[in-house]
Image (cartoon, rainbow, N blue to C red):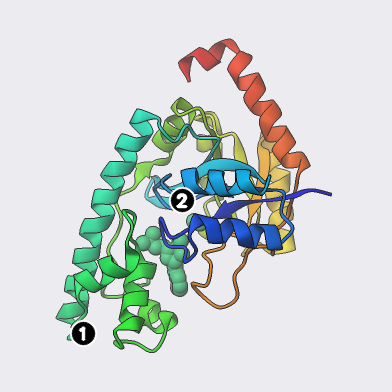
Amino acid sequence: MKFADLHLHTNFSDGTWTPEELVLQAQKSGLSCIAVTDHDTVEGCERAAAACAAVKMEFIPGAELTAEHEDTELHVLGYYLDIHNEKLLAEIARFQVVRQNRIYEMVARINDLGVPLKAESVFALANCKSPGRPHVARAMVKDGHVKNLDEAFERFLKKGRPAWVPKSKISALDAIELVHQAGGVAVMAHPGLNRTDSVIPALVAAGLDGIECFHTKHSTAISERYLEIADKYNLLVTGGSDCHGYSKGKPLIGTVKLPYEHIQKMKEHRAKATTLPSAAAR
Ligand code: AMP
Ligand code: FE
Ligand code: FE
Ligand code: ZN
């Protein structure tokens, strides 16, 4: 049996591993195929592809886009993206500027609470264009402002806490279109985490291709629920660990193993999409 993990982060967003370290760990976990899905960036894909090629592992270039539909945040995964697609890169660049400005805003709020965290400290630690809350939390631990990441999130960074700053998000329908015009397959990430089932019909109407049924934080019952939804709407089934390296305890890679038949179905779906007349609009 061959297995895949289609949800993995590197240090080009909030994962702790380089693309090369991630591929090494994927090999150790016995995976045959991986996708890198960093938050709002595709920058790690080129190096991950090279590292995969060196060990004959199948690689799918991806990204996890922060999106929203009717005020509900959800994440849209894109697979088989053309990582040089101009529109995709332009949109990503816009998001990254917002993410960087958001770091200053979060740090200012933390400073207002009497904690002398420096933005430079966060940027030095993040060392990427898609910084986020985990980098703020790690910098706070590193500089001795909190004991651990949990404390940083619980006291400051969680939604509703004083240093929580909303992100600007792409509309989920636009995210699906952005993925399609970059040659990709659009998948709704971890639906069980966001309690966003009510948005599924609208996403399907906008051309959603798949749904992430298997995820570390989905119980068996939740996975089964989304397998039924995938069946109902004729959606591709995907899955992944959402591993962020050593960000929090034991790395998650290897805990979700997607049977390879789902990759095969994704490829068949893509082949069909490019031969259908409507593909011209993509
Ligand atoms: P951001 O995209 O900047 O809002 O950060 C979201 C990321 O923070 C998620 O992808 C997780 O990696 C991480 N995260 C969210 N909540 C927590 C938490 N309570 N503890 C640790 N990490 C978290
Ligand atoms: Fe993350
Ligand atoms: Fe996510
Ligand atoms: Zn993720």
Label 1 sits on a secondary structure element that is loop
In-front residue for pair 32/198 = 32
Percent from the top left, x then y, of residue 64?
47, 48
As shown in the figure, which amino acid type bears the numbered disc 2?
Leu
Q: Which residue is mark 2?
A: 74
As shown in the figure, which amino acid type bears the numbered disc 1?
Val
Query: In the image, is residue 159 above or below residue 194?
Result: below
In the image, taking residue 106 as reference, residue 225 lies left or right, namely right
Residue at screen point 32% across, 71% down: 136
Numbered label attached to residue 204: none
Percent from the top left, x then y, of residue 171?
37, 40
Query: In the image, is residue 80 above or below residue 238?
Result: above
Percent from the top left, x then y, of residue 229?
68, 43
Q: Which residue is mark 1?
A: 115
In-front residue for pair 156/104 = 104
In the image, taking residue 257 as reference, residue 82 lies left or right, namely left
In the image, taking residue 166 as reference, residue 218 lies left or right, namely right
Query: In the image, is residue 243 above or below residue 121?
Result: above
Residue at screen point 30% across, 55% down: 167
Ligand 3 within 8 A of label 2's CB? no
Percent from the top left, x then y, of residue 25?
63, 62
